[in-house]
Image: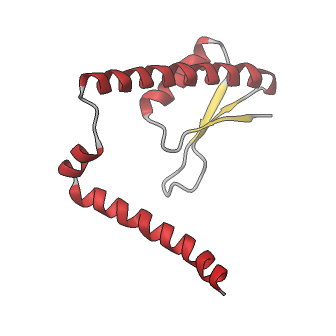
């Protein structure tokens, strides 16, 4: 029976391709399902044989650890170089988007906290 290894919703195509290559390189049989036209199905990579799942999961965890370290090192390098995006740079480049995000967060926090404050005051 097949076992779900990795959901592909929101995963960049390059990362999905690297995961496919990793599984193929280690001889692990898998298949994919797509989300479909209206994106209501599960886009995912499934392992065909349950016996391969533990090995595939270990490979996937090692891949993600390596990817995390590479991305983190790149970010730290950009911070050291002064080329990493700061809040103020992003605010200057996309003021409307940043302001809308701040308003959305404030809206959510307000309606999350106000009922508790009103309840506490009663």
Relative to 88, residue 59 above or below: above
| Residue 120, percent from left and from top | 66, 79
Disc tally is 0
Report the front residue among 45 and 115: 115
Q: Which residue is farthest bottom?
A: 122
Instruction: Please indicate whether residue 22 sits to the left or right of residue 77 in the image.
Output: right
Instruction: Please indicate whether residue 5 sits to the left or right of residue 110 in the image.
Output: right
| Residue 55, percent from left and from top | 73, 18
Quadrant the C terminus occupies? bottom right
Relative to 91, residue 83 above or below: above
Report the front residue among 113 and 31: 113
**Scheme of image coloration:** secondary structure
Q: Tell me what residue is drawn at x 66 percent, y 13 percent.
A: 27
Q: Tell me what residue is drawn at x 47 percent, y 28 percent.
A: 15
Instruction: Kindly indicate the quadrant of the structure image that contains residue 115.
Output: bottom right
Q: Tell me what residue is drawn at x 36 percent, y 66 percent.
A: 103
Quadrant the N terminus occupies? top right
| Residue 16, percent from left and from top | 50, 30
Instruction: Please indicate whether residue 119 sits to the left or right of residue 67 in the image.
Output: right
| Residue 78, percent from left and from top | 30, 25
Report the front residue among 31 and 82: 82
Relative to 51, residue 118 above or below: below
């Amino acid at each position: 029976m097949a076992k779900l290894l990795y959901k592909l919703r929101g995963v960049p195509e390059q990362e999905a391709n690297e995961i496919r290559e990793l599984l193929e390189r280690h001889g692990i049989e898998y298949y994919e399902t797509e989300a479909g036209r209206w994106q209501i199905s599960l886009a995912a990579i499934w392992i065909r044989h349950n016996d391969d799942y533990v090995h595939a999961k270990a490979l996937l965890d090692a891949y993600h650890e390596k990817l995390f370290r590479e991305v983190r090192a790149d970010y730290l390098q950009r911070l050291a170089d002064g080329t990493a995006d700061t809040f103020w740079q992003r605010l200057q480049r996309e003021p409307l988007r940043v302001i809308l995000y701040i308003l959305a967060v404030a809206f959510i926090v307000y309606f999350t906290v106000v009922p508790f404050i009103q309840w506490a005051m009663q």
